[in-house]
Amino acid sequence: MSTKVEIQKKIKVIISDLSQDVGQIYIPYIHGALKSYCEEISVLKQAVEWSRPIYDCRDYKKLLDSIERPDILGISCYVWNIQSQIWLAEQVKLAFPNCLIVAGGPSVPDMSEVFLRENPFIDIAVHGEGEVTFSQILLYELGQCPDLESICGLSFIDRYQQYIKTPKRSRLKSLKHLRNAYDFPELIEVIHEVKKNGYSTGAILETNRGCPFGCVFCDWGSATNSKIKTFSRSKVFSEIDFFSDLKIDHVFCADANFGIFQDDLETADYLVEKKAATGHPRLFTFNAAKKSTTRIFEISQKLSQENMSLIGTTFSPQSLSEVALEIAGRKNIPAQLFADGISAHNDFGLPIYSEVLVGLPGETRESFQRGITELLDLGVHNNIRVYPLILLPNAPMSSPEYLLKHKIKTIKAKVWLEHCPPVPEREELVDLVIYNSTMNPNDWVFQMSFGTMVQAFHCAGWTNYLSEYLSQSKQVGYFDFYTRLSKHLEQDLGPMGDFYREIVSIYKGIIDSPPQNYFGWSSYSVNFNGKIEKLKSFPYVRLWMKMILNQKLIFKELKEFLRTLDLSQTSLASKILDFQKETLYSPEVPIDDEKLFVSSYDFVSFFTKKSKIIEEGTFRIRLKPRSRNNLEKVFNSTYSAKNFLTAATGGGNVVARQFSYDISNSQIESL
């Protein structure tokens, strides 16, 4: 016989999940995840009032004014918002001294004493999965739990100023009972408000939790104890129905290895089915499983057919140095593991990208250069992302023992703040690795600069066809080509060298004058059609933009570089550079227009159909602009440098790498 619990009081809870991407706001998933779990407990369903979550970080005064006397504020802390969340917590405590403030999320350190003492307005830190721990904190506030020390998975400073950390909480034995985390009136209200304010909507989808890999720079595997547990199919499909019905634009899958299970194919099928029926969700982004090549290929095909892939499928080794991979705990994920998947995606024209880290112990200048160019050999041409290594507070790499063993040193650097605008008097900072046993600060600058050069010259369409031809004809391999180009740029006295040295100086500035933006995100001026305009972008985009406004001079300098390679067929290589120039976007030609030109060689068939020879003759080539994923035209009535750059990079999303015409979609006619 069940007994009804008598409710002595009710409490008001507010969850803050501050996040904002480029023109896009994510619906606060953590609010729904906590609420859906807590409402399975009858006393919490009766006694807890869940206020509308805090999500919009564009206007902090308006944000503070909207908060109405909470009993509990929960802040979800990530690398891009932790300082903003701490600032918010402090302001709320000043306004409402009796409010209990609870901090959770991956950026709350497991060793939390310093964190709590430096931020005394935060009452409780939650470690690991939050659903059970947060529900028991609510029960404690309602007098249904004897004391905080009886709750696993948290830490706090008690009234005697003693640091208390309770035993680690075990993960949920099963996720199958958890239900839809979005279908709540306050979240539907948020969605309508975001759309009304002109922002696109993003949402997080979890189909499983856990990661079987133990990469030391990541807190994913260590945070979830590796074992993967799946959510029910009904929950996953119910949330996809919600995204479709509420017309969510972009769904980001938070799984560490989407595609690792057969069920993930069904999830992809259902997403495609809903997109075909309602047009939403428009886009789906995921972290691909490392060892499920065939299944990942099938998923990529399905998404591509419905135009749901924004940036493609990731094949990210992080490093191609065997030494660095072993030290990083990724020996079981060698780069060659990705080779078949990359080849299959390329054969079917499916977009892919790779990520590489600068700063891993065991990596050297030469191994980094070889790693980047080995990715080109593997077939990753359009999108290689080079990221600096940062220490995450709960990653194994951040342990004192690991730091000492590998002589790791860091500096404070600013986070790229398009995820979450800064708050008054606080900067989002990270610990940027600039020194280890095999890398000094000069090496860091060199590797970042080399990676940026390959991004701008190869991935963004200046030398990719030339270097591919030279590699295939066994005249100059990718490694030799780009290491020699790097040395040439260091000494070049023309605009090409000047622009490259600007990039080097940006990275040097991060080392010499911290804290600086760790991506090198910077402001600069360009002369666009006789008008000086200010822009702000990543280094490789900055390099590309300055080069594109000086195309004639840059290609003249590239031909001078070509002569230094001592080629057997310099004339043909020079013609490939002419072809390369035609494939680039140009301020003189609207990007949404087709481009027509005549060539004396059929380079299109050689590079798209992998012909063994380059046919000579007279060919009319018609190039078509790349797909824009249904993005609207950005020009309107104003033709500016900013709008040109926005169109060239795929509607402002610079990770799209759409800097040039897609020759695989071209038409060629022999005259």
Image (cartoon, rainbow, N blue to C red):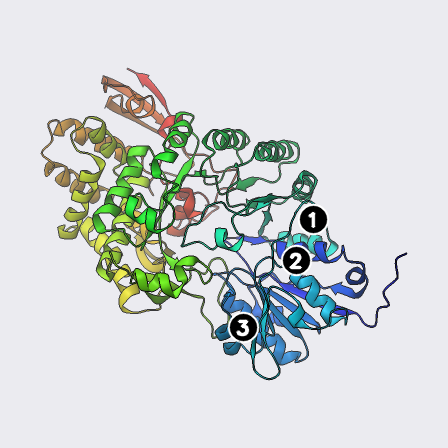
> Up-down: is 500 above or below 434?
above
Of callouts 3 and 2, which one flags the residue occurring earlier in the amino acid sequence?
A: 3
Q: Is residue 332 above or below residue 43?
A: above
Residue 528 position in % (x across, y down): 32, 51
x and y percentages locating residue 80 in the rendered image:
48, 61
- What's the distance in space between the residues labelled 3 and 2, CA to CA? 24 Å
Q: Which residue position holds label 1?
A: 178
Mark on residue 131? 2
Specify few, some or many for label 2: CA neighbours under 10 Å numbering under 14, 14-19, or 20 or more: some
Question: Callout 3, which amino acid?
Answer: Trp
Left or right: 478, with 299 as reference point: left
The answer, for residue 67, to whether it is visible in the render is: no
Q: Are discs 2 and 1 less than 8 Å apart at CB?
A: yes
Question: Percent from the top left, x then y, of residue 224?
Answer: 54, 52
What's the residue type where badge 2 is placed? Answer: Glu
* Quadrant showing the N terminus: bottom right
Q: CA distance from mark 1 to mark 3?
A: 32 Å
Query: Quarter holding the C terminus?
Result: top left
Identity of the residue drawn at 65% across and 69% down: 73
**Residue, disc 3:** 87
Q: Quadrant of residue 514?
A: bottom left
Which label number is shown at residue 170?
A: none
x 70%, y 57%: residue: 35
Viewer-proximal residue among 472 and 434: 434
Return the residue found at the far top: 671
Considering the numbered disc 3 on the image, is that residue within a helix, a strand or a loop? helix
Nearest to viewer (mark 1 / mark 3): 1
Q: Helix, strand, or loop for circle 1? A: loop
Say which amino acid is labelled 1.
Leu
**Mark 3 vs mark 2: in front:** 2
Q: Earlier in the sequence, mark 2 or mark 1?
A: 2
